[in-house]
Amino acid sequence: LNFVLNSLVKNNLLLLLVKSIKRTDETLSLSHENKITLDSLLYELTAFKATLSFLIRVAETRHGAQQLLQSEIFQTIKACSFLLIDPDLGLELVFDETTIQTSTFVRVNLNLDTPLAFDDSSKGVSLFELLVPTFQLVAAILLSTSSENKPVIEQVHKLLLHFRRLIVGVLKR
Protein backbone atom coordinates (compact mmCIF):
# COMPACT_ATOMS: atom_id res chain seq x y z
CA LEU A 1 0.00 0.00 0.00
CA ASN A 2 2.90 2.38 0.68
CA PHE A 3 4.11 2.07 -2.91
CA VAL A 4 0.62 2.86 -4.23
CA LEU A 5 0.22 5.74 -1.78
CA ASN A 6 3.61 7.21 -2.67
CA SER A 7 2.76 7.01 -6.37
CA LEU A 8 -0.60 8.69 -5.80
CA VAL A 9 0.94 11.48 -3.75
CA LYS A 10 3.83 11.96 -6.19
CA ASN A 11 1.46 12.36 -9.13
CA ASN A 12 -1.07 14.42 -7.15
CA LEU A 13 -3.74 11.78 -7.71
CA LEU A 14 -4.66 11.45 -4.04
CA LEU A 15 -5.82 15.07 -4.07
CA LEU A 16 -7.93 14.34 -7.15
CA LEU A 17 -9.53 11.35 -5.40
CA VAL A 18 -10.38 13.57 -2.43
CA LYS A 19 -11.84 16.21 -4.75
CA SER A 20 -14.01 13.55 -6.42
CA ILE A 21 -16.06 13.50 -3.22
CA LYS A 22 -17.09 17.05 -4.05
CA ARG A 23 -18.06 15.96 -7.57
CA THR A 24 -20.58 13.51 -6.12
CA ASP A 25 -21.99 16.31 -4.00
CA GLU A 26 -22.33 18.50 -7.10
CA THR A 27 -24.04 15.65 -8.96
CA LEU A 28 -26.62 15.32 -6.21
CA SER A 29 -27.14 19.08 -6.35
CA LEU A 30 -27.69 18.94 -10.12
CA SER A 31 -30.38 16.32 -9.65
CA HIS A 32 -32.51 18.97 -7.89
CA GLU A 33 -32.49 20.92 -11.13
CA ASN A 34 -33.24 17.83 -13.23
CA LYS A 35 -29.93 18.08 -15.11
CA ILE A 36 -28.67 14.49 -14.78
CA THR A 37 -30.04 11.08 -15.60
CA LEU A 38 -30.65 8.20 -13.26
CA ASP A 39 -27.81 6.28 -14.89
CA SER A 40 -25.44 9.18 -14.19
CA LEU A 41 -26.51 9.21 -10.55
CA LEU A 42 -25.97 5.47 -10.17
CA TYR A 43 -22.56 5.79 -11.79
CA GLU A 44 -21.56 8.63 -9.45
CA LEU A 45 -22.83 6.79 -6.36
CA THR A 46 -20.91 3.66 -7.34
CA ALA A 47 -17.76 5.68 -7.99
CA PHE A 48 -18.28 7.52 -4.69
CA LYS A 49 -18.55 4.30 -2.70
CA ALA A 50 -15.50 2.79 -4.47
CA THR A 51 -13.44 5.94 -3.89
CA LEU A 52 -14.36 6.10 -0.23
CA SER A 53 -13.60 2.41 0.18
CA PHE A 54 -10.11 3.00 -1.24
CA LEU A 55 -9.59 6.13 0.86
CA ILE A 56 -10.58 4.18 3.98
CA ARG A 57 -7.83 1.66 3.17
CA VAL A 58 -5.36 4.51 2.69
CA ALA A 59 -6.45 6.11 5.97
CA GLU A 60 -5.75 2.90 7.89
CA THR A 61 -2.03 3.72 7.83
CA ARG A 62 -0.50 6.64 9.67
CA HIS A 63 1.23 7.93 6.53
CA GLY A 64 -1.96 7.58 4.49
CA ALA A 65 -4.01 9.44 7.10
CA GLN A 66 -1.46 12.25 7.13
CA GLN A 67 -1.55 12.50 3.35
CA LEU A 68 -5.36 12.66 3.40
CA LEU A 69 -5.19 15.43 5.99
CA GLN A 70 -2.79 17.34 3.73
CA SER A 71 -5.28 16.85 0.90
CA GLU A 72 -7.86 18.65 3.07
CA ILE A 73 -10.20 15.69 3.39
CA PHE A 74 -12.08 17.16 6.35
CA GLN A 75 -12.71 20.46 4.58
CA THR A 76 -13.97 18.57 1.53
CA ILE A 77 -16.35 16.48 3.65
CA LYS A 78 -17.53 19.53 5.54
CA ALA A 79 -18.36 21.29 2.25
CA CYS A 80 -20.64 18.45 1.07
CA SER A 81 -24.21 19.72 1.02
CA PHE A 82 -25.75 16.23 0.77
CA LEU A 83 -24.58 15.67 4.36
CA LEU A 84 -26.63 18.67 5.51
CA ILE A 85 -30.03 17.28 4.53
CA ASP A 86 -32.61 16.59 7.19
CA PRO A 87 -32.31 12.86 7.94
CA ASP A 88 -35.97 12.64 8.92
CA LEU A 89 -37.23 14.11 5.63
CA GLY A 90 -34.63 12.84 3.20
CA LEU A 91 -34.16 14.36 -0.22
CA GLU A 92 -36.23 13.90 -3.34
CA LEU A 93 -34.33 13.70 -6.60
CA VAL A 94 -36.08 14.08 -9.95
CA PHE A 95 -34.69 12.74 -13.22
CA ASP A 96 -35.89 13.18 -16.76
CA GLU A 97 -35.60 9.74 -18.34
CA THR A 98 -36.01 10.27 -22.05
CA THR A 99 -36.90 7.32 -24.22
CA ILE A 100 -37.33 7.32 -27.98
CA GLN A 101 -41.03 8.16 -27.85
CA THR A 102 -41.64 9.78 -24.48
CA SER A 103 -40.00 11.71 -21.72
CA THR A 104 -40.89 10.65 -18.19
CA PHE A 105 -39.80 11.94 -14.84
CA VAL A 106 -38.44 9.51 -12.29
CA ARG A 107 -38.60 10.52 -8.66
CA VAL A 108 -36.07 8.99 -6.28
CA ASN A 109 -36.18 9.59 -2.56
CA LEU A 110 -32.87 9.65 -0.70
CA ASN A 111 -33.61 8.79 2.94
CA LEU A 112 -32.52 6.65 5.87
CA ASP A 113 -35.27 4.06 5.62
CA THR A 114 -35.11 2.82 2.03
CA PRO A 115 -32.51 0.33 0.78
CA LEU A 116 -30.78 0.86 -2.55
CA ALA A 117 -33.14 -0.53 -5.19
CA PHE A 118 -34.26 0.79 -8.54
CA ASP A 119 -37.22 -1.08 -9.87
CA ASP A 120 -40.85 -0.26 -10.45
CA SER A 121 -41.86 -0.93 -6.84
CA SER A 122 -39.08 1.01 -5.13
CA LYS A 123 -37.65 4.39 -6.05
CA GLY A 124 -35.28 5.04 -3.20
CA VAL A 125 -31.66 5.18 -2.18
CA SER A 126 -30.62 4.66 1.41
CA LEU A 127 -28.83 7.66 2.80
CA PHE A 128 -26.81 5.20 4.88
CA GLU A 129 -25.01 4.15 1.70
CA LEU A 130 -23.48 7.64 1.56
CA LEU A 131 -23.12 8.32 5.27
CA VAL A 132 -21.53 5.13 6.54
CA PRO A 133 -18.44 5.16 4.28
CA THR A 134 -17.99 8.90 4.80
CA PHE A 135 -17.86 8.63 8.56
CA GLN A 136 -15.86 5.38 8.40
CA LEU A 137 -13.24 7.42 6.59
CA VAL A 138 -13.29 10.07 9.33
CA ALA A 139 -12.99 7.36 12.01
CA ALA A 140 -10.11 5.65 10.17
CA ILE A 141 -8.17 8.91 9.94
CA LEU A 142 -8.79 9.65 13.61
CA LEU A 143 -7.68 6.19 14.74
CA SER A 144 -4.59 6.16 12.52
CA THR A 145 -3.28 9.51 13.69
CA SER A 146 -3.50 8.37 17.35
CA SER A 147 -4.89 10.13 20.36
CA GLU A 148 -1.85 12.41 20.79
CA ASN A 149 -2.68 14.35 17.64
CA LYS A 150 -4.77 17.17 19.13
CA PRO A 151 -5.33 19.14 15.88
CA VAL A 152 -6.90 16.10 14.20
CA ILE A 153 -9.11 15.48 17.24
CA GLU A 154 -10.22 19.11 17.13
CA GLN A 155 -10.95 18.92 13.38
CA VAL A 156 -13.04 15.78 13.86
CA HIS A 157 -14.87 17.41 16.76
CA LYS A 158 -15.69 20.46 14.61
CA LEU A 159 -16.80 18.19 11.76
CA LEU A 160 -19.11 16.24 14.07
CA LEU A 161 -20.54 19.47 15.48
CA HIS A 162 -21.15 20.70 11.93
CA PHE A 163 -23.13 17.53 11.14
CA ARG A 164 -24.74 17.25 14.59
CA ARG A 165 -28.30 17.23 13.25
CA LEU A 166 -27.50 14.45 10.80
CA ILE A 167 -25.68 12.36 13.40
CA VAL A 168 -28.55 12.68 15.90
CA GLY A 169 -31.01 11.68 13.18
CA VAL A 170 -28.95 8.62 12.27
CA LEU A 171 -28.49 7.56 15.88
CA LYS A 172 -32.26 7.80 16.46
CA ARG A 173 -32.74 5.07 13.89
Image (tube, rainbow, N blue to C red):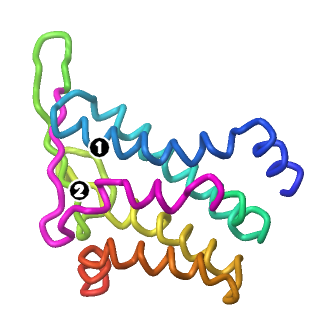
- Circle 2 is placed at which residue position? 110
Does residue 104 lie above or below 14 as drawn?
Answer: above
Instruction: Give the side of residue 1 with respect to residue 24, left or right.
Output: right
Quadrant in which the N terminus is drawn: bottom right
Q: Secondary structure at mark 1?
A: helix
| Residue at 36% across, 46% down | 25
Q: Secondary structure at mark 2?
A: strand
- Circle 1 is placed at which residue position? 28
Instruction: Give the side of residue 127 with respect to residue 139, left or right.
Output: left
Does residue 85 lie above or below 60 as drawn?
Answer: above
Give the image location of residue 89, x and y in percent: 12, 66
What's the distance in space between the residues labelled 2 and 1, CA to CA? Answer: 10 Å
| Residue at 50% across, 65% down | 133
Give the image location of residue 152, x and y in percent: 59, 76
Quadrant in the picture for residue 62: bottom right
Q: Are marks 2 and 1 in contact (CB under 8 Å)?
A: yes
Please provide the residue range marked out in magenta: 69-96
